[in-house]
Amino acid sequence: MDMTKETLLETADLICNNTFIFNHKWDMEVCKTPVTFEKDIIWNKIPFKDEEWVFMLNRHKFWTFLAKAYHLTKDEKYLTTFISQINSWIDNVDINNPDFKDCSRTIEMGLRCINWIKTLEIFERDYKFDEELKNKIYSSLKEQSDILLNVYDDFRTLSNWGVLQNCGLITFAFYYNLLDTDYFKIPLERLEYQCKIQILPDGIHWEQSPMYQNEVLNCLIETAVQFKHHEMEIPAFIKETIKKIALSNLLMKKPNHHQPMQGDSDDTDLRDIITRASAILEDGELKFGGFSEIDFESIWELDKRSIENYKNIEAIAPKNPSVALNQSGNYYLRNSFDKDANYLWFFCGPMGSGHGHAEILHFDLTYNGENFFIDSGRYTYVGEDPLRIQLKDCSSHNTIIVDNKSFTEYSGSWGTKKSPFILNSYYDFNDKYDYVDGGHLGYVSLPDSVISFRKIFWLKPDLWIVTDEFTANDKHTFKQFFNFDTHIDVSLNNDTAILKGENKLYMKWSDEIKKEIKDTVISKEYNKIEKSKKIETEGEFSNNHILFTVISPKDLEVEKVVVRRGDLSEVPENEAKAIRIKISENHEVIFFDVSQETVAQKKTYLISDILFYGKTGYIEIKDNVKTFKVIKY
């Protein structure tokens, strides 16, 4: 939820009554079910059997709401509530006592440093705290900062945890003027190394979860703002990392400006965080992906100079709408950045951390600005909740499995037993079409090994062909999964799937396979579950196999056509396959795919009187004029 003045004051009023909800859009684990403490706050309480709630409680972002509410209204209740609650926490939480272990993780300590100091800074615009309380807060922050300096290992070096705790230390050092001490020098040195190894060259955080990528970005922006506040030059590595991550946000965001629900991510609007990055860096390319004016939330997060200068930044559109972030295996295909654009996200990269899901070869598809095919989200981290594993599983992603076996296997909420090796992707983007492919070796351990490969061809503006290839020797089964947004009505009519929202899409397949509509669930927000529909297909194959799935806003005619060699002999379908798609009376497209290397002397193919050499391509016939293109050799 985007924070407005009204929602800010409503939330602050709840806090004054010892009632807690976590409703900020960038809360890592949102919980909008209120929990009220009738008397004293129990800081290690775990409601709903979800430890994430107590983690959120002890990050204390809600105290910044009290400070903002006080600045806006000058109502003393917000100030007295903060003073009461921070005294309660300091007096009652012993971070060295195992009973408070859920209050004492280093990630919470780092965020507390940021949130406590931000709260103090906002209150101090209008109020001067007495020295006794200030000393009490300093002593607690110093105790926590000493732990953050000493507790640091390989896990924290690579994890978002480490970034958050180092940014917390830097914030602590700035506020208390400790810039000549280890509280500043050590975390800054650590942070520079983390930015080198955690952020891939294409700007994606290695954990492959936009929700946590953007928590890292938020903290880096907080740190950059501290440098600006104190009239110090922002280190180059911080500026470079902010630009890389924010640019990847711009490139990944859907036509509705939301991030894909990749891994453990919610359906969150990216514009505010891109706006802050643009303002800090004075970057026009980033401004294109943000708001035209500073939003209500960002006013509180930025320094005065960045806010005042934002209106002078000229927005610059990216040169190319489609982009391959191939180091992370994320590919974003679109015809524009407009709200009514067509958009497809294809993933063929490493799973990342425990936040990663079994979504290799998954795609999201947005048509005319409307989400149709989507990722199913995360819902919860509670390990014993069956929805945790269900939403991480292949079946909750628009991908394919073989022999009814998931290519990724999990152990509890966070552990991974097996994740497949990725096969390199190939892509080709131009004004006429976009193409991307990829595969994995998740089934090579079967008694008869299977290699699974997917190719997506988009003939612009609105024809998508998904090719699924299986390379094997013996008999196997396969399943495709297609998960849809909650508002999409799904029906089957013979060989056609009809998807109705404000717009309409049709799906057709090149072969007779079993198709079934099933009830499922998706989660656009942590702790929130919604009913939806999905299509599961199932088929058998022996040896190599090629299956085409055609998606279009028109109910097109799709039929297989014979592929021949140059000597006119017929090519078996387990080697090469082609389909003819009739778009109109004078317009048709033939798409072909070759699934194996040709070792004989006759390496040419013949389709519609066109002789060619290559593995993937198409023939377009319009007004009796043929256009031929090999996409991949």
Image (cartoon, rainbow, N blue to C red):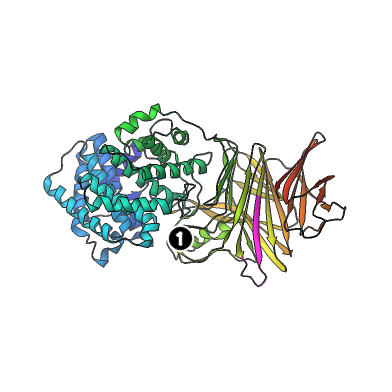
Quarter of the N terminus within the rendering: top left
Residue 5 at least partly seen: yes
| 218 left or right, relative to 377 | left
| Foreground pick, 442 / 190 | 190
Residue 19 at least partly seen: no
State the image coordinates of residue 216 (x, y, percent, origin top left): 39, 49
> Crowding at label 1, few (<14), some or many (≥20) Cα neighbours within 10 Å?
some
Residue 549, magenta (yes or no): no
| 93 left or right, relative to 390 | left
Outermost residue on the front side: it is: 601
Outermost residue on the top side: it is: 312
Outermost residue on the bottom side: it is: 447
| 489 left or right, relative to 84 | right
The count of marks equals 1
| 226 left or right, relative to 485 | left
State the image coordinates of residue 599 (x, y, percent, origin top left): 77, 60
Residue 444, magenta (yes or no): yes
Residue at the spot x=51%, y=41% of the render? 251
Q: Name the residue under label 1.
A: 354
Residue at the spot x=51%, y=58% of the render? 351
State the image coordinates of residue 554 (x, y, percent, origin top left): 71, 40
Q: Quadrant of residue 147?
A: bottom left
Q: In this view, does 342 lie above or below 90?
A: above
Name the kind of residue labelled 1 in the image: Gly
State the image coordinates of residue 401 (x, y, percent, origin top left): 62, 61
Residue at the spot x=22%, y=37% of the render? 75
Magenta stretch: give its range. 443-455
| Foreground pick, 161 / 480 | 161
Element assignment for label 1: loop
